[in-house]
Structures are given as structure tokens and as C-alpha cells.
Amino acid sequence: MTQDGFVVSDGTAFYGRTFEEYCELFDLAVHDLVDRRILDCPGGPGSFTAVAARVGTDAVAVDPEYGPPVATLEETCSSAVDDVVDQLQAKTDLFDWSFYGDVATRERYARAAATRFLADYARQPDRYVDAALPALPFDDGAFDLVCSANLLFLYDDRFGIGFHRDAALELARVASEELRIAGLQSLDAERSEYVDPVMATLREAGCTVESREVEYRFQPGPTEVLVVTDVDSVV
């Protein structure tokens, strides 16, 4: 099975996107981020946190892969990008290229994200927290905005509904204003069967949940982001 072209075995894929891709994926603009405290969970080797910090955001990323030295993560990132390029070249017809145009451009995005991530990881290690859902080491409402992409719903063949509900509530718990969850499709490119139950769980907790269409295209399937507000009701 693949996720964004990366082979996935028993775990989840450690890959990254650029700041620009994140804005498209989550339907965000720079003015939505300035002067806000933001959590990216899971962050992977993406450049969102590094760039967000440069535009006036207090950004933090969480991922269970954080912790090893830069050289180790550099090897992991390089190997992952090599793998994705090989796979995308062999399976170009399985993806929507309206955003990237071609495999070479997708590769440039991935390498740029990894390079920016690694530089910031070396300079500002406190921004990158080794932790994992469904239990995060943050206080209630610690972040104004929480973003989570391609973990919930994507891996619904290995994380059950209990994990999805607990993880969604945990993401909402650490948000004070808003939670956005992107990537509503599972690995088979269909809308995950857990989307509606998770939305119901969040609403039962007092949240307002909206499904919003986004412009970003790559994987087949749903092109929506869940926008969750009234998150201060979750404790």
C-alpha cells in the first residue's frame, strides 16, 4: 500500500510537505496564522513549522519519529524521497497531477520540505516534540490552531474507531480556537468509514464541525478538510 507514493508497511509514512502545500491542504492563508500558537500533529519532515515561525507564528510540531540526530533523519528523509520518486514514476496514472504537474515537481517539493525541516530541527529542536496521539503532552487549549493531516482516516486499516475518536478529542482538547483535520480518504482512496463517527463524536463533545472543500489535489478521493470550532468545550 502507498500513501502519497510512499510505501507503508506496519507503521505510518514519515514524509513531509512544504508550507505552501499545507496552506492549500488546510485551506489556510498567511494571515490566518500570524500571532497564533499552532500545533502540527503529526508534523513529519515538513517545513510548515519552520516557515510558520518565520511569518510570526509560534509553531510546534509533534511526531513519534522526532528525537534522533539530524544525520539520522536526513538519511531517512532522503531514502523516503528516493522511494516516492521511483513509485510515482511507475504509477503516475493513480494520482491527480493538477496541483504538481509532474513527478519532478512533486520531488522538488518533497526535497525542499525535508531540507527546510532538517535545518530548523537542528537549530530549534524545542519546536519538535517526540510524542504521539492519542495522548499529547500539552495543557488544555495550549494552541490557538491545531492541524492534523494524513494520520486519522488514512490508516483506518490499522487504527480502529476507538483510536480515531480518542485522537480527534485529544487534538480538540489542546486547541483553544480551532482544529483542522485534512485527508479524509483511506489508503484505498475512498472516504474513510470513520469520518462520520468522528464528526459525531466531536459534535457530542460540544464542537461545531464543518466539512470544507479545498483546492489541493493529489490523491484520488475526497478533497475536504474538517474545520472544528467551539473546541473549548472539550476537556
Image (cartoon, rainbow, N blue to C red):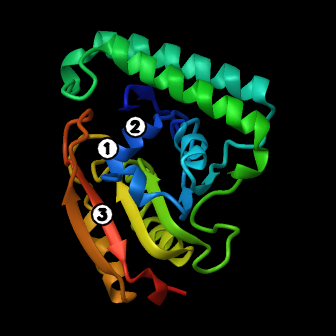
Q: Is residue 169 above or below residue 6?
A: below
The structure residue drawn at horizontal position 70% and vertical position 50%, both measured from the top left corner, is 127
Image quarter hosting the C terminus:
bottom right
Q: Is residue 151 above or below residue 68?
A: below
Residue 152 seen in render = no
Residue 20 picture quarter: top left
Q: Amino acid at mark 2?
A: Glu
In the drawing, does residue 116 fall left or right of residue 88?
Answer: right
The structure residue drawn at horizontal position 69% and vertical position 23%, both measured from the top left corner, is 74
SS for tag 2? helix
User: Along the line of sight, which residue is nearer the eye, 229 or 79?
Assistant: 229
In the drawing, does residue 174 fall left or right of residue 205?
Answer: right
Q: Please say if the residues under marks 2 and 1 sit with CB atoms less than 8 Å apart.
A: yes
Q: Amino acid at mark 1?
A: Glu
Q: Is residue 18 above or below residue 84?
A: below
Q: Which residue is mark 2?
A: 20
